[in-house]
Image (spheres, rainbow, N blue to C red):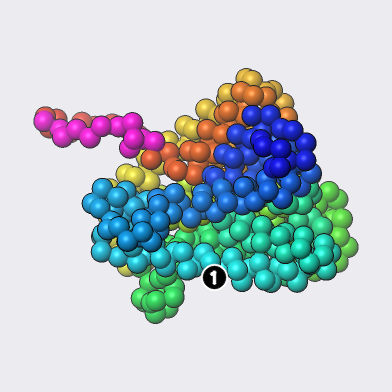
Amino acid sequence: MLPPMTHTPITLSDALFTSTSAVTVTGLNVVDTELVYAFWGQLVIAVLIQLGGLGLMTFAVLIWSALGRPLGITQGTYLREDLNQTSYGKLTRLVWTILRIVVMAEVAGAMLLCLSFMPHHGLGPGLWHAIFHSVSAFNNAGFSTFSPGLTGYALDPVVNVVIPVLFIAGGIGYVVIADLYQRAFWRGWSLHTRMMMVGTAILIVGGVAMTAILEWDNPNTLAQYHSITARLTVAWFQGVTTRTAGFNSTDIAGLEDSTSFMYMILMIIGAGPTSTGGGLKVTTVFVMLLATWAFLRRRTEVTGFGRSIPLGDVLKAMALMAMASAVIVTAIFLLLISEGGDFVDIAFEVSSAFGTVGLSRAYTPELSEFGRAVIMVVMFLGRVGPLTLGFFLATRMVPRVRYPAGQVHLG
């Protein structure tokens, strides 16, 4: 809210919403980032995006380690949970690996994006646009320093390759990237990496193909381009960015309702654990599908890729889906009461906030103060995960009584 940060004064609500959207790497905006925020304001947004994407626990351990302080048991426990690790031994090494991955990816992305941005905006502004979009893309934030998003670069080959590579790499998670680099193809991969790679590939192919099919004759999106190559290019970018990143190369408000509904599903699924994205997570949905398949096959053990999945992980996935459903349904209900308007617009907004995606059907600026508060809570829960809140509120109790089994009729 300081004068050097903005071209025009903003309210406390505007600043709080933008800060929440940035630190949760969402990308929803109530004001125009390009027109309202000056360079210093955009720099603050970029720093918040980096902190949110890197993870506050990871950043704290980096500072702790740089100061030469040993990692205590309490800090190690929090970090182990934050990074979904089972041992304490490799935590510090993993954190520094994460930092190296982030720096290399964002520097390389910025250098390549300069090829597209500098010819249009000049040396200084072009460099800043490239840095900002590289940070935003790798952290799956969806923030852009251009008012219309990336619609002006819808057919630019560099943007259509570099931006997706950055947010896909950030969305699969640091652990998966390290696994891919250090271990042999497939046989050496962990079960988590196998699930993430297969699930990500299915979602990318499905999202791009369905975008092309559903939007091919829509004059507001793909049909405004006459060549097949141009339509496929836009379908590629928009289909792959929807699940995590939230950049747009076409008019989101002009999408068909069927496409919007598909995008809601992709946004809710989200990215991978220990990644820069939010949502339910790919592995959560994967585990639930495997559990459903095991039930239909009348098996008592859930298996996948030659490995069994512990019952505790299945219960965790069930709890996560139940709590996520409760958050999304409650938020939609509250916004329908307070805001009114089109149901698809509201459901799309909530799905985007929970998945920390940042796409909007031009509905975010219309939110009231109460509506902004609801979306901020959903963004926060989508980034930290509903289970985190559940673990924080719940108390662990050891059962003292065991009850006899009862029969419940389901389905």
Residue 88 left/right relative to 169: left
**321 or 301: nearer the viewer:** 321
Percent position of residue 34, x then y: 76, 47
Q: Is residue 43 magenta?
A: no
Residue situated furthest top in the rendering: 337
Amino acid type, mark 1: Met
The part of the image, by quadrant, that contains residue 359 is top right
The part of the image, by quadrant, that contains residue 318 is top left
Q: Which quadrant would the N terminus be assigned to in this image? A: top right
**Residue 30 appears in the figure:** yes
Q: Residue at 30% of width from left, 65% of height from top?
A: 90
Percent position of residue 190, x then y: 35, 68
Q: Which quadrant would the C terminus be assigned to in this image? A: top left
Residue 251 left/right relative to 373: right
Percent position of residue 284, x then y: 42, 50
* The magenta segment: 389-400
Q: Residue at 44% of width from left, 75% of height from top?
A: 181
The answer to whether 123 is drawn above or below residue 368 in the figure is below
- Report which residue position mark 1 lands on: 104
The answer to whether 318 is drawn above or below residue 400 in the figure is below
Residue 151 left/right relative to 315: right
Percent position of residue 389, x then y: 39, 36
Q: Residue at 25% of width from left, 32% of height from top?
A: 395
Q: Residues within 10 Å of mark 1 (few under 14, many from 20)?
A: few
Residue situated furthest bottom in the rendering: 184
